[in-house]
């Protein structure tokens, strides 16, 4: 299916033409039919000669209903511009074209209605002059008369050529369906409609609506129920558990985790100078119309404060309008949907320099961002970004952080600390990164993470002077009786707590058999030599006596020798020394 929006001055025959093309009544409200003018959005559809389906979003042409018109045009990729042959170019035609031009609509056809009442060539020539220099320059023109049917086959053929030239939609993309109508159907509940421009909707899908999760209860497209609807399409979505007053035009159903709702955006404005913009502007994005306050940053760049949070992302386009003057200020391109505050003097100028890099600079400007947030901003992660769990790290930022990380580990080594290195959490705080996973991702050889600390794996461990002296005293204690491990009291007297002993063990100065049992580093070898001189196999008691130590030391020491395969424990709990 393809979706085309009408555009043109009030009473130039847009709805009549849609009715003639489709056989359907696009004016939904009795008031519209009574007054003979479209007030709100209308919808109708038909099948083209080649078999393709096209749906029309019929928009109002009266100046008072321009916001309604923009709600219909905003999400639609193509337009049918209608100009009456007997009246020609009119003020509202100009504003509609200005809106289409600002939105970047290039795929369109010019339908010159009432060609049975006046020469259509004059209207076509005048329209071409006005369209020159806009995105609609050079669009094909077809004279038609809805009452007589003249030109309708040619118009259908032109629409077929138009739809064939439209770019193929991405049906696998995340969904963002801008709501243009919300109503209640007896027995079904709340239904919303909109133009699905990308992605696919399926029954029972869960979507995000204003921060809450909602589920699709039913789907329709072109009046028929469907299990799934792919872009581009006009869809009606029946939502489970949502009251009709909880959703309105301008809301968006979107894939969870995409398009962060924001009330501040940095943008580029192509059109009027943002510095000269008046107060009371309105931003039209999708089907939404949001009051904004504009803060010029310099050149075409500005910061917009939105009247309510809106799910937009970098690269989105919108339209900025002055409703008081009925004037299109310009096309807005979102560059950053979650900009940092401007607090320091000169921050605006610096921000302009950053924004000139484009939307892809978001990760570079922040350094570290949650992957989901980056997706929510509508920014694709650069190929060289470093993944760290749920986080992404800019390549340049990663290089700087790694340099600072290496400096931190080096500083720690020379600080006299008994610890092997700073803790991961201490490094996280020092680097100012949001999560320990970021630190872990930054660690590369020769650095490593060991026991929750970042260490230099190639550096020779050194002992602080106080610990070195304590180890010397311990060595003297064990010189005469190498297996009589000092008790906790003696270790405390020597100043060898758990951290000091861990440092001594890393330096290879002691052997910690188990907690509270500390021997010299060659105790395993010497014990095996002593035990090899015993008659094989031997008992625990015989080993204890040969080693000249207590059961407190002998039991864990023998278990250590077993693990190191220096001894073998037999089923009767006796042991033999390997090779004895």
Image (cartoon, grey):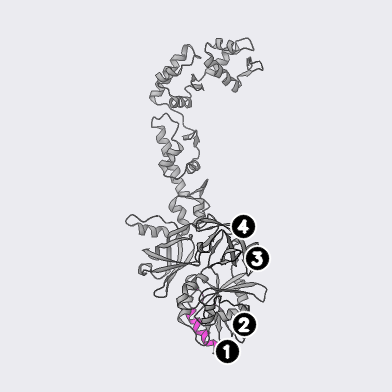
Secondary structure of residue under mark 4: loop
Q: Of circles 3 and 1, which is in front?
A: 3
Q: Position of residue 136 (x, y in %)?
A: 51, 75
Q: Of circles 4 and 2, which is in front?
A: 4
Per the model, the C-alpha gap separating discs 3 and 2 is: 30 Å
Q: Is residue 206 found left or right of 358 in the rendered image?
A: right
Give the residue pinned by disc 2: 152
Give the class, few, some or many, for how many residues have Cα within 10 Å of label 2's Cα (few <14, many ≥20).
some
Q: Are marks 3 and 2 in contact (CB under 8 Å)?
A: no
Give the residue pinned by disc 1: 116
Depth check: give the residue in front, 377 or 216. Answer: 216
Per the model, the C-alpha gap separating discs 4 and 2 is: 41 Å
Earlier in the chain: of badge 3 and badge 1, it is 1
In this orientation, does residue 223 appear?
Answer: yes
Give the residue pinned by disc 4: 204
Q: Are marks 2 and 1 in contact (CB under 8 Å)?
A: no
Question: Residue at coordinates 64% horizontally, 72% vertically from top-left?
Answer: 53
Secondary structure of residue under mark 1: loop
Give the residue pinned by disc 3: 225
Q: Position of residue 170 (x, y in %)?
A: 59, 62
Question: Residue at coordinates 52% horizontally, 16% vertically from top-left?
Answer: 552
In this orientation, does residue 446 appear?
Answer: no
Earlier in the chain: of badge 3 and badge 2, it is 2
Q: Are marks 3 and 1 in contact (CB under 8 Å)?
A: no
Secondary structure of residue under mark 2: helix
């Amino acid at each position: 299916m393809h979706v085309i929006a009408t555009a043109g001055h009030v009473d130039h025959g847009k709805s009549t033409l849609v009715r003639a093309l489709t056989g359907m009544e696009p004016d939904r409200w009795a008031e519209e039919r009574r007054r003979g003018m479209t007030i709100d959005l209308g919808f109708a559809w038909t099948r083209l000669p080649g078999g393709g389906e096209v749906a029309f979003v019929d928009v109002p042409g009266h100046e008072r209903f321009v916001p309604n018109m923009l709600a219909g045009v905003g999400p639609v990729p193509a337009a049918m511009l209608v100009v009456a042959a007997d009246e020609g170019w009119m003020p509202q035609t100009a504003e509609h074209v200005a809106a289409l031009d600002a939105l970047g609509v290039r795929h369109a056809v010019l339908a010159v209605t009432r060609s049975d009442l006046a020469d259509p060539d004059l209207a076509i020539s005048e329209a071409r002059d006005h369209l020159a220099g806009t995105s609609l320059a050079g669009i094909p023109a077809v004279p038609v008369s809805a009452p007589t049917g003249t030109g309708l086959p040619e118009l259908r053929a032109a629409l077929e050529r138009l739809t064939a030239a439209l770019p193929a939609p991405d049906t696998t993309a995340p969904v963002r369906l801008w709501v243009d109508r919300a109503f209640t159907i007896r027995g079904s509940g709340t239904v919303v409609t909109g133009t699905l421009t990308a992605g696919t909707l399926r029954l029972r899908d869960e979507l995000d609506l204003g921060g809450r999760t909602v589920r699709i209860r039913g789907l329709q497209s072109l009046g028929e129920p469907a299990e799934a609807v792919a872009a581009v399409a006009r869809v009606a979505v029946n939502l489970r558990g949502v009251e009709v007053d909880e959703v309105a035009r301008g809301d968006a159903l979107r894939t969870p985790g995409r398009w962060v709702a924001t009330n501040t955006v940095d943008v580029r404005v192509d059109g009027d100078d943002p510095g000269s913009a008046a107060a009371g502007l309105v931003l039209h994005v999708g089907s939404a119309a949001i009051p904004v306050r504009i803060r010029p940053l310099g050149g075409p760049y500005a910061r917009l404060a939105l009247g309510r949070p809106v799910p937009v992302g970098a690269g989105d386009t919108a339209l900025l309008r002055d409703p008081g003057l009925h004037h299109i200020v310009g096309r807005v391109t979102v560059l950053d949907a979650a900009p940092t505050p401007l607090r320091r003097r000169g921050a605006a100028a610096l921000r302009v320099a950053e924004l000139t890099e484009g939307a892809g600079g978001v990760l570079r400007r922040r350094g570290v961002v949650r992957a989901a947030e980056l997706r929510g901003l509508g920014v694709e992660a650069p190929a060289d970004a470093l993944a760290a769990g749920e986080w992404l790290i800019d390549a340049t930022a990663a290089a700087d952080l790694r340099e600072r990380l290496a400096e931190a580990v080096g500083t720690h080594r020379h600080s006299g600390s008994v610890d092997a290195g700073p803790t991961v959490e201490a490094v996280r705080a020092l680097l100012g990164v949001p999560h320990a996973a970021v630190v872990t991702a930054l660690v590369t050889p020769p650095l490593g993470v060991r026991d929750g600390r970042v260490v230099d794996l190639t550096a020779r461990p050194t002992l602080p002077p106080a610990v070195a002296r304590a180890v010397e005293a311990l060595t003297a204690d064990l010189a005469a009786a190498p297996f009589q491990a000092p008790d906790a009291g003696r270790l405390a007297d020597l100043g060898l707590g758990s951290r000091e002993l861990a440092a001594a063990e890393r330096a290879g100065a002691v052997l910690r058999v188990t907690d509270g049992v500390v021997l010299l580093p060659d105790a395993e070898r010497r014990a095996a030599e002593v035990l090899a001189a015993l008659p094989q196999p031997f008992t625990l008691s015989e080993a204890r006596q040969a080693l000249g130590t207590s059961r407190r030391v002998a039991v864990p020491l023998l278990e250590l020798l077993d693990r190191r395969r220096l001894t073998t424990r037999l089923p009767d709990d006796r042991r033999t020394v390997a090779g004895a």
